[in-house]
Amino acid sequence: MAKQFPALSDAHRDFIARQHMFFTATATTDSRVNISPREIGALRVVDAQTVLYLDRTGSGMETAAHLRADGRMTIMLCSFAGPPQIMRLYGQGTALSHGTAAFDSAIAAHFDAPLPLGTRQIVRLAIDLVQTSCGYGVPLFDYQGERQAMENWHDNKGEEGIRDWWDKENRESIDGLPTGFPAL
């Protein structure tokens, strides 16, 4: 039932636009597999072979470490309402760190200012395969809205507290891999 495509079509873009969340998955040959849920408002389709997402400060920074060491990444979207479907975007990911020219360029081209507090990087996925499948096993859920917990955490930390967090908590993955996050 799976179908494979070399790039995103207009129908794929429409499917993405109807979702409320996506998942990212990364790993290296010697690390734990990291899977993270993300809110769809952070995702931007740049073109048929490229997506970006805004990554905000959280408990760890596994994705950046894995992309630096290996580069493989999968983004998965599931239809929790409406017709069932799963879409996976496979490819090579790159972390564009806060304060770099690549980050600034991606922000200017694809995201509105001002940036949400806690924005630490943009992740770019160069897609080499799009795969859709039936999604029959995905349950139906009702979307109630976004949680405010992340906003509250960022607001309580403030810009200086977030920068301290980056320095203390975002330099290495849980497996000890460097994230490549720039010195502040």
Image (spheres, grey):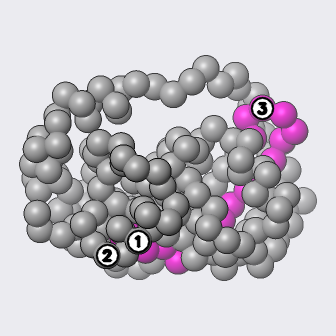
Closer to viewer: mark 3 or mark 1: 1
Q: Quadrant of the N terminus?
A: bottom right
Q: Which residue is pictured at 44% across the width and 54% down the height?
A: 54
Label of residue 55 in the image: none
Q: Is residue 170 above or below residue 151?
A: below
Q: Quadrant of residue 75?
A: bottom right
In the image, is residue 151 above or below residue 70?
Answer: above
Would you say 101 lies left or right of 145 here?
left
Horizontal side, residue 97 vs residue 37: left or right = left
Q: Are marks 1 and 2 in contact (CB under 8 Å)?
A: yes
* 89 falls in the magenta region: yes
Residue in view at x 25 percent, y 57 percent: 174
Tell me the magenta residue range.
79-96
Helix, strand or loop under label 1: helix
Mark 3 crowdedness (10 Å alpha carbons): few <14, some 14-19, many ≥20: some
Q: Residue at x 78, y 50 (%)?
A: 15
Kind of residue at badge 2: Ala
User: Helix, strand or loop at disc 2?
Assistant: helix
Mark 1 = which residue? 105
Q: Nearer the viewer, residue 174 or 7?
A: 7
Q: Which residue is mark 3?
A: 81
Question: Which type of secondary structure does the marked residue at label 3 adopt?
Answer: loop
Q: Is residue 98 magenta?
A: no
Nearer the observer: mark 3 or 2; the answer is 2
Q: Position of residue 25 (x, y in %)?
A: 51, 59
Instruction: Kindly identify which residue carries mark 2.
Output: 101
Q: Position of residue 127 (x, y in %)?
A: 63, 75
The amino acid sitting under disc 1 is Ser
